[in-house]
Image: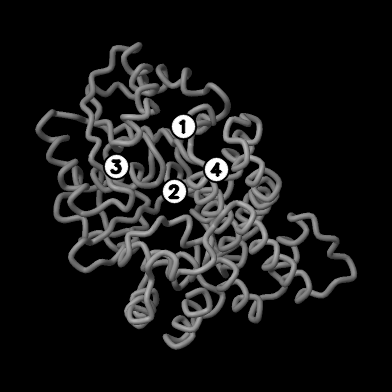
C-alpha cells in the first residue's frame, strides 16, 4: 500500500455555541490584526456581526473586506490583498461558506507568495504557507474551511480555477450550527447536496482508502437522514448540528481522497453561467454516478448500506441503482431544479463546458476518464 498523507487543520472547533469559545484560540496565535473576509449578505444579515462581537470582546484589531461574490473572482482576491497590505493585517478571519473561505485562501497565498492568483491554478503550486486563517463557516456544505482546495473564477476566461494547495489550509476551523439556523431553505439544500457530492465522489474515486471511506460513509448516512429535515425546518438545531458533522466528515474525505467529474463539470457551469456550485453538483451527481457505476459498481454497495438499503443478497448493480435513485429523490425533495435549461444553460455552450471540464483539476480523480463526447452527453441528459 502506498504512503498516505492526511491533511486537516490543526485546530477544529465544532458544535452548538462553539463560536463563543474561539477567543482564546485566536489569542494563542499571538497575531496583531485580522483581515475579516466575508460578503455583503452576511454583514447585512447580522451573521458576520455575531463573529465580530466575539472579536470585539477579546479586543482584537481587525478590518473588514466584504466584497466577496458568490463565485469569487480574481478581482476579489487581489482587492482583498490590497486591503490587507494597506492596513497592516498579519492574518485572516474568513466568515461564510465556500466563497469567503476560498477568497481568504487566495488572499493568504498571494500575501506570502506574490504574483497573480492564476499562477496557482493546479496542484501545490505555491512555495510558502499562507498567512494564518481562522475559518468560521456558516453553511453545512462546502467544507472549504477544512480543505486544501479553493476555487476562484477567472473573469476573463470564464473558467473556475481549481487550486489544490497544502499551503492554503486554515489554521483553525470553526463550525457552529447556530450560525446556520437562519439560512434560506434553497441555500441549505444546495450546500447539503454539495456535501453529499463530496462524500460520494470521495468513495468512488481510485484515491479512496480506509480512512477516507470511513469518514465519507459516516457523512452519507448523516446527510441522508438529516438534510430534508433541515431544509423543512431551518431552526431545527439538532438536525443542523448533524449536518455540520456530516459536512466536516465529507470534507476530510475528499480533501484526502479526491473528487471527480461531478465537480469537474459543475465548475464549468459556475464559471460560464455564474450558477450556485451546490445546485450544479446536485443536478450532475446522479448523472455522473450512473456512468461511474458501469465501471466500479462494487463501490456503491457500502453507499447503499449507509442510506439504509438492505444490500444482503443484492447485486452491486442493484445497490448502485438504489443509490442513484435515492440521490434523485432527495434532490427532488429538497427542491433542486431538474433541468439545466431552467438555469439558462444552452446547447451552444456544451462543447466549451466539456472541453474545460476535461482540463479541470478534479477530473483525474474520476473512476474512468470520459471522452469529450461522453461529457457532452452527460450534460445533455439534464439540459
Of marks 1 and 2, which one's residue comes earlier in the chain?
2
Image vertical order of residue 268 relative to residue 82, above or below = below
Badge 1: how crowded within 10 Å, few (<14), some, or many (20+)?
A: many
What separation in Å lies between label 4 and label 3 (alpha carbons)? 19 Å
Report, in whole angstroms, how far the alpha carbon at label 4 lies from the one at label 2.
10 Å
Question: Which comes sooner in the sequence, label 4 or label 2?
Answer: 2
Secondary structure type for disc 4: helix
Tell me the SS state at disc 2: loop
- What residue appears at the point 65 percent right and 81 percent down from the top-left corner? 294
Disc 1 and disc 2: Cα gap in Å?
13 Å
The type of colouring in the image is one colour
Left or right: 48 in relation to 109: right
Please, is residue 27 above or below residue 227 in the view?
above
Up/down of 77 relative to 36, above or below: below
**Residue 174 shows which numbered tag?**
1
Q: Are marks 2 and 3 in contact (CB under 8 Å)?
A: no
Amino acid at each position: 500500500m502506498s504512503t498516505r498523507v492526511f491533511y486537516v487543520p490543526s485546530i477544529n472547533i465544532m458544535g452548538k455555541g462553539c463560536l463563543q469559545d474561539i477567543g482564546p484560540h485566536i489569542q494563542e496565535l499571538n497575531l496583531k490584526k485580522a483581515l475579516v473576509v466575508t460578503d455583503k449578505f452576511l454583514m447585512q444579515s447580522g451573521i458576520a456581526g455575531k463573529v465580530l462581537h466575539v472579536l470585539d470582546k477579546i479586543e482584537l484589531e481587525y478590518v473588514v473586506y466584504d466584497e466577496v461574490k458568490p463565485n469569487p473572482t480574481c478581482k476579489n482576491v487581489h482587492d482583498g490583498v490590497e486591503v490587507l497590505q494597506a492596513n497592516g493585517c498579519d492574518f485572516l478571519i474568513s466568515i461564510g461558506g465556500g466563497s469567503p473561505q476560498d477568497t481568504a485562501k487566495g488572499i493568504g497565498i498571494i500575501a506570502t507568495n506574490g504574483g497573480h492568483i492564476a499562477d496557482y491554478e493546479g496542484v501545490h503550486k505555491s512555495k510558502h504557507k499562507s498567512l494564518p486563517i481562522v475559518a468560521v463557516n456558516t453553511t453545512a456544505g462546502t467544507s472549504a474551511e477544512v480543505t486544501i482546495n479553493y476555487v476562484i473564477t477567472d473573469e476573463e476566461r470564464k473558467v473556475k480555477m481549481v487550486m489544490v494547495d497544502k499551503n492554503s489550509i486554515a489554521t483553525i476551523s470553526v463550525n457552529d450550527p447556530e450560525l446556520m439556523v437562519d439560512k434560506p431553505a434553497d441555500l441549505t439544500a444546495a450546500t447539503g447536496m454539495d456535501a453529499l457530492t463530496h462524500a460520494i465522489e470521495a468513495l468512488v474515486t481510485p484515491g479512496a482508502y480506509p480512512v477516507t471511506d470511513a469518514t465519507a460513509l459516516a457523512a452519507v448516512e448523516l446527510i441522508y437522514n438529516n438534510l430534508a429535515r433541515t431544509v423543512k425546518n431551518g431552526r431545527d438545531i439538532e438536525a443542523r448540528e448533524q449536518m455540520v458533522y456530516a459536512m466536516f466528515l465529507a470534507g476530510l474525505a475528499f480533501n484526502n481522497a479526491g473528487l471527480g467529474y461531478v465537480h469537474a463539470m459543475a465548475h464549468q457551469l459556475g464559471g460560464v453561467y455564474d450558477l450556485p456550485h451546490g445546485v450544479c453538483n446536485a443536478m450532475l451527481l446522479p448523472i455522473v454516478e450512473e456512468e461511474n457505476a458501469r465501471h466500479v459498481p462494487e463501490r456503491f454497495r457500502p453507499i447503499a448500506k449507509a442510506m439504509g438499503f438492505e444490500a444482503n443478497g443484492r447485486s452491486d448493480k442493484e445497490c448502485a441503482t438504489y443509490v442513484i435513485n435515492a440521490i434523485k429523490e432527495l434532490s427532488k425533495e429538497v427542491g433542486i431544479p431538474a433541468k439545466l435549461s431552467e438555469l439558462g444553460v444552452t446547447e451552444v455552450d456544451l462543447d466549451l463546458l466539456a472541453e474545460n471540464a476535461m482540463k479541470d483539476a478534479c477530473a483525474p480523480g474520476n473512476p474512468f476518464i470520459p471522452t469529450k463526447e461522453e461529457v457532452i452527453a452527460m450534460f445533455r441528459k439534464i439540459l
